[in-house]
Image (tube, rainbow, N blue to C red):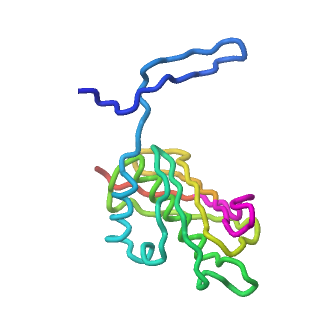
Amino acid sequence: MDTCPAKVAVVRVLSPLVTNVFKGECKPVAKITIDEFQKLMTEELPSAAEVGMHLQAIDHGKATMVLPFADNMLRPGGTVSGPSMMALADGAMYAVVLSMIGHVKLAVTTNFNINFLRKPLPGDLIAEGAIIKLGKRLAVIEVTLYSNGGEDGPGEPVAHATGTYSIPPR
């Protein structure tokens, strides 16, 4: 039985004149599915599920989460609140980590930093997360948040977050 579910041709550009193609290399896949992650969120983090936060896409080291807009997310001035954006960013980081290590209950946030870049318009928030580095005990992740409140859909980023997750010994 083949242990690699997704063999692909991998192209590596070594210089402008030299390109190598390696056929049949194994492309890693996420170690948790969207359905498994949503079940975990419902059972173990019900507050996230209650506000409708959901995983839209997951791949090995990447995840996209959505927080549907609700009026209670607004703060004075008609902008989406910082705590709403922070919760979504942290949820996306968690999904990214689990995409790499599978369902590990005690993988927890140890550091979180967010830069608010522009006023998010009222609308769904979209978080796109990616792994920066995965070690034995720590994972470093970045997330870019977008607001879907404009007429043209998501445009410029509204926030950028980085975080570190502690990974318990296995």
Query: Which of the image's four quarters has the N terminus?
Result: top left
Q: Nearer the viewer, residue 78 or 168?
A: 78
* Quarter of the rendering containing residue 66: bottom right
- 33 with respect to 128 (left or right): left
**Is-magenta flag for residue 98?**
no
Q: Nearer the viewer, residue 9 or 113?
A: 9
Q: Residue at x 65, y 78 (%)?
A: 81
- 20 with respect to 54 (left or right): right
Question: Which segment did they paint magenta?
Answer: 145-162
- With respect to residue 100, does 89 lie above or below? below
Q: Residue at x 74, y 61 (%)?
A: 152
- With respect to residue 80, does 164 lie above or below? above
Residue at the far front: name it.
151
Where residue 10 sits: x, y (%)? 52, 24
* Quarter of the rendering containing residue 76: bottom right
Q: Residue at x 36, y 46 (%)?
A: 31
- With respect to residue 80, does 102 lie above or below? above
Where residue 142 sits: x, y (%)? 59, 54
